[in-house]
Image (spheres, helix red, strand yellow):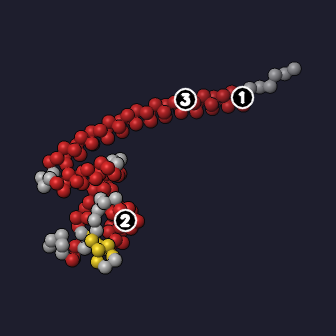
Amino acid sequence: MTADDPQELRGIQEVAASLGVTARTLRFYEDRGLIEPRRVGTARVYTRRETGRMQLILRGKRLGFSLREIEEFLDLYDADPQHVEQMRALAERCRERIEELNQQKIAIVQTLAELETIEREAMERVTAVLTETPAVP
């Protein structure tokens, strides 16, 4: 079976359901030039290759890569049959993303600690006000 085999072609609703996205999402990535479904009349049909590209796009988005970065990965994939350059670029971008996420993690830990301190101090003040006994004249 080749990628051109009619049995490998699937409609937009079937592909969207299999990927857990909407048909609108598929059209969005098509409009951006990241996927190129074929046309049978007015219907879009997707090859295994286009479905695989969508899986890579969705994974890239989930990992926080920009559309521009995802497009670069896809272009490298198409240009290099052994995918060496794509893997190098991917590894570099992953390292950058890991560093970004580690910085965010540090910021989140600091913010949580500060919020917990503020919450504790606020509750201590509330408790102090509620447990004060009125002064007897």
Q: Amino acid at mark 2?
A: Arg
Label 1 vs 2, first from the N-terminus? 2
Marks 3 & 1, CB-CB < 8 Å contact? no
- Examine the rendered structure and indicate whether residue 12 appears above or below residue 107: below
**In front: mark 1 or mark 2?**
2
Across and down, in percent, residue 41 comes to: 31, 79
Identify the mark at residue 117; answer none if there is no mark.
Answer: 3
Identify the mark at residue 129; answer none if there is no mark.
Answer: 1
Residue count near mark 1 (Cα–Cα under 10 Å), binned few <14, some 14–19, many ≥20: few
**In front: mark 2 or mark 3?**
2
Q: Residue at x 60, y 28 (%)?
A: 121
Quadrant location of the N terminus in the rendered image: bottom left
Residue count near mark 2 (Cα–Cα under 10 Å), binned few <14, some 14–19, many ≥20: some
- Examine the rendered structure and indicate whether residue 105 appears above or below residue 70: above
Q: Under tag 2, what secondary structure?
A: helix
The residues tagged by marks 3 and 1 sit, at their Cα atoms, a distance apart of 18 Å
**Residue wearing tag 2:** 27
Residue 101 visible in the snapshot = yes
Q: Amino acid at mark 3?
A: Thr
Q: Residue at x 34, y 77 (%)?
A: 42
